[in-house]
Image (tube, rainbow, N blue to C red):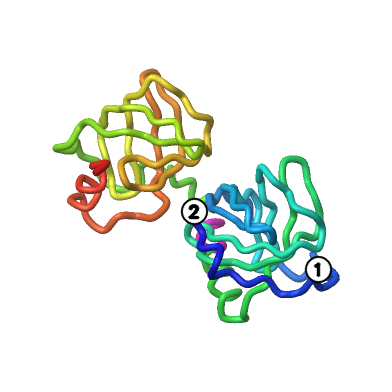
Amino acid sequence: MLNATAQKFEPHAAPSFDATRFQSVKVSLLGRYMLEDRREFPCQIIEMSPGDAHVIAPASGKVGEKIIAYLDHVGRVEGTIIDLIDGGFHMEVNVSPRKRDSIAAQLTWFANKDILNLPEDRRHDRQVPDIRHSSIILDDGRKYNCKIIDISLSGAAIEIDVRPQMGTPVTLGRMRARVVRHFDNGIAVEFSSVQEVFSVVQRNLHTN
């Protein structure tokens, strides 16, 4: 959860975004954002450049409104809504030159990953964990027991009765993840960040 008391919103400035300055990359990044009235929501970035982002979100705010977001793989991003789109909004990214360079490097990696066609859930060796039973929690609080089929440092295959939509953010045990694949008796999820060693993955499958 974002710390509302620690966030500061600067006064409005008229949007002056130049879409030709940066090249956008198709992505699927999960995160959370806060509107100026301190309401907080989950979101998904579907296209991003170092200067802007297209955001799928349950609450769009209004054009000119300031946004503070925390995005997987990117971190904290401040921005301004410059347009409303179907199911969300288009925001200008207002960051320092150093942060913009960091975002550009991250987006370059995403673009190259797609060109090389690397499967999200097969980038690392997989193994059957010692802990086979865990739980999945959706962003709306619904919780489901599940059985772990196998794990890697970047994701897991899970036997579960429900089928959340592709891209749905979930929490597996204590790890944030998103649904990347469906199969006959379950789903595959990708962790929001790659874990260092298998023991960390197994420890985080615990829910307490």
Q: Is residue 204 above or below residue 37?
A: above
Q: Residue at x 53, y 70 (%)?
A: 6
* Residue 187 at x, y percent in the picture: 40, 29
Which residue is painted at 23% across and 31% down in the image?
Answer: 133
| The residue stretch that appears in magenta | 107-113
The residue under label 2 is: 113
Give the left or right position of residue 190, taking residue 204 as reference: right
**How many badges with numbers are in the image?**
2
Type of amino acid at the residue the image marks with label 2 = Lys
Kindly report the secondary structure that dominates the magenta region of the rendered protein.
helix
- Pick out the residue farthest to the bottom: 97
Among the 4 quarters of the image, the one containing residue 195 = bottom left
Q: Which percent across, then down, holds residue 4?
A: 56, 63
Whether residue 86 is visible, yes or no, is: yes
Percent x, y for residue 159? 32, 25
| Mark 2 neighbour class, 10 Å CA radius: few under 14, some 14 to 19, many 20 or more | few
Residue identified by numbered label 1: 17
Q: CA distance from mark 2 to mark 1?
A: 28 Å
Residue at 67 percent across and 51 percent down: it is 55
The quadrant of the rendering that contains the C terminus is top left
Question: Helix, strand or loop at disc 2?
Answer: helix
Residue in the foreground of this view, choosing between 54 and 33: 33
Q: Which mark is residue 157?
A: none
- Can residue 23 be seen from the camera position used here? no
Q: Is residue 191 magenta?
A: no
Across and down, in percent, residue 32 comes to 55, 53
Q: Nearer the viewer, residue 51 or 139?
A: 139
Q: Nearer the viewer, residue 117 or 97?
A: 97
- Horizontal relation, residue 13 to residue 109: left or right: right
Residue type pointed to by label 1? Phe
